[in-house]
Amino acid sequence: MTKPITRLCPSCRAPNLLRRKTCASCVCPLQQSGKDLQSWAKSVKANKNSHRTLESAHVSVTKLNALGYCPLLFVGRHGRKGEINGDMVHHIPVNDEVVREILKKMGKLYEHLLKRSQYEIIRLTLLLSTALEKQFYAVPKF
């Protein structure tokens, strides 16, 4: 049997399988071939096709929902004036005021995370997940 191909994490130097997108030990995103992604992004922006990519993400969220998953996609971009805008794509029914407030807070937290530096994002993600779990379980169930 052949040995699986691994690559090292750029931050913690831990070995990870080649198919992994994040490090198993520090949850840092693993680098893909950056040269190809940069040239692809440059051509998409030059041809003004970024809407197609975003629409494809919306379709993926819809398909995941049809398969029984509960997808929640956060999308952030720079506005025309340089401000950072965050948006969410989800299929959660927003009938209840509590659900609406939670989704609004999640959107504000995501915008706040986008404004932070890359190193603080990893630390704040762990804090955010525990805070959201506490807030979710604090909501009275009917």
Image: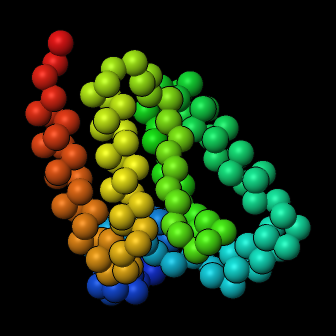
Picture quadrant where residue 40 is located: bottom right
Q: Is residue 91 above or below residue 30?
A: above
- Depth order, front residue of 9/84: 84
Q: Looking at the picture, how far across and down is residue 21, in whole percent?
A: 47, 65
At x 34%, y 47%, the residue is 106
- Indicate left or right for 72 with 54 as reference: left
- Depth order, front residue of 22/55: 55
Picture quadrant where residue 94 is located: top left
Q: Can see residue 23? A: no
Q: Looking at the picture, how far across and down is residue 73, in whole percent?
A: 50, 47
- Depth order, front residue of 32/91: 91
Q: Can see residue 97? A: yes
At x 37%, y 42%, the residue is 104
At x 82%, y 60%, the residue is 49
Q: Considering the image in quadrants, where does the C terminus appear?
A: top left
Q: Is residue 27 above or below residue 71?
A: below
- Indicate left or right for 101 with 76 as reference: left
Q: Looking at the picture, how far across and down is residue 69, in whole percent?
A: 45, 32
Colouring method of the image = rainbow
Q: Is residue 54 above or below residue 78?
A: above
- Depth order, front residue of 102/39: 102
